[in-house]
Amino acid sequence: MMNVYKSSLDASKRINRYIVSTSLKRSSWLSDETGANVFFKYENLQYTGSFKFRGALNKLFSLADEERSKGIITASTGNHGVAIARAMSILKIPGLIFTPSNVSEYKLERIKKYGVEIKQFGNDCVISEREARKFSSIKGMNYISPYNDTDVIAGQGTIGIELLEQCPHADSIFISLGGGGLISGIAGSIKQEDKNVKIVACSPENSPVMHKSIKAGRICNIETKPTLSDGTAGGVEEGSITFELCQKLIDDYILVSEEEIVFALKSFMENENLAIEGSAALAIAGFLKQSNKWIGKNVVIILCGGNISRKQLKEIS
């Protein structure tokens, strides 16, 4: 199993000058409401609007010149695609991005802004990932997984490295769970230094693939429904290294309804006057479900992204 802490330290040295070291701020609103000492980690203010830029940039920096010249292929439900597109533009690497046909139009437009070629295939991220891998093999290009990649995980782990300095006495960290790249990176880098911190994984009831897989002891192919937390939606690639990391590193799992995600998103925006996307609201909703457990404790909530369209905001208003 990868040493996430060491890999994340190495990643920090590579990418620090290109990323935002995002702030950690105490939320008076949520702290007063719940009795916990709640801090938000603002990855919604990262370049490209999500944490994904860290992993994308670290992966591309890790490629040898010969690999870069072959070009990049990836698959994404949106945020990873935007992040890879920006990283490709910085390093001047050609490439192609696969997305599911049901990807958010808003996120699709953000990918297009960087002039990257896009192919839409399937209606689930696992189907898109499978096709992208197949295409990369045929073309001899480098496939980059949104989560099933040690360099991508290490990039996301730089959030944990920052948190060790910003909040060295956290009692719990609430993190949205999709393919597991974000939570594996953060948990792996933090638990190396602080084994007592509790890592809480938050999944939408409509798309709890990794959640159900961990419970079953194997990666499952289950039917999912649309969710406002589209950044965590869809299946998990067979054999993903994040599965074993999640098994080892996560302390608790929470399922959240669509109504709870909407409530958390609206409450945050009304009280903090800042936009977040559904996958960030997912972590807030998860905390709200068990806030009684954390009264008087230091709680960190990762705001993983802020890419939400006006259309989505209108639909929930």
Image (tube, helix red, strand yellow):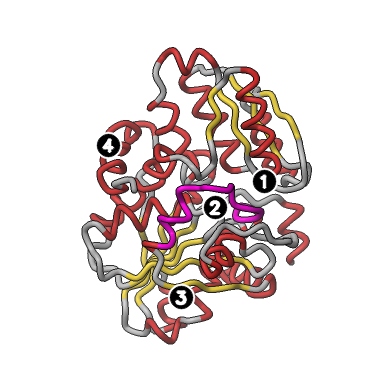
Label annotation for residue 10: 4
Labelled pair 1, 2 in contact (Cβ < 8 Å): yes
Q: Which residue is mark 3?
A: 30
Residue at the image point whose x is 34% and y is 48% from the top: 1
Asked if the magenta segment contains residue 244, the reply would be yes
Q: Which residue is mark 2?
A: 179
Q: Residues within 10 Å of mark 3 (few under 14, many from 20)?
A: many
Identified by mark 3, the residue type is Leu
In depth, the one of 217 and 56 nearer the eye is: 217
Residue 75: x and y in percent read 63, 37
Labelled pair 3, 2 in contact (Cβ < 8 Å): no
- Can you say whether 37 is above or below 240 in the image? below
Residue 156: x and y in percent read 41, 46
Mark 1–mark 2 distance (CA, rounded to whole Å): 10 Å
Q: Quadrant of the C terminus?
A: bottom right
Query: SS for tag 1?
Result: helix
- Can you say whether 173 is above or below 30 in the image? above
* Lateral position of residue 172 relative to residue 113, left or right: left
* Lateral position of residue 33 relative to residue 10, left or right: right
Identified by mark 4, the residue type is Asp
Asked if the magenta segment contains residue 133, the reply would be no
Kindly indicate the quadrant of the structure image that contains residue 139: top right
Identified by mark 1, the residue type is Cys
Mark nearest the camera among 4 and 3 is 4
Q: Earlier in the sequence, mark 3 or mark 1?
A: 3
Q: Earlier in the sequence, mark 3 or mark 2?
A: 3
Label annotation for residue 125: 1
Magenta span: 231-247
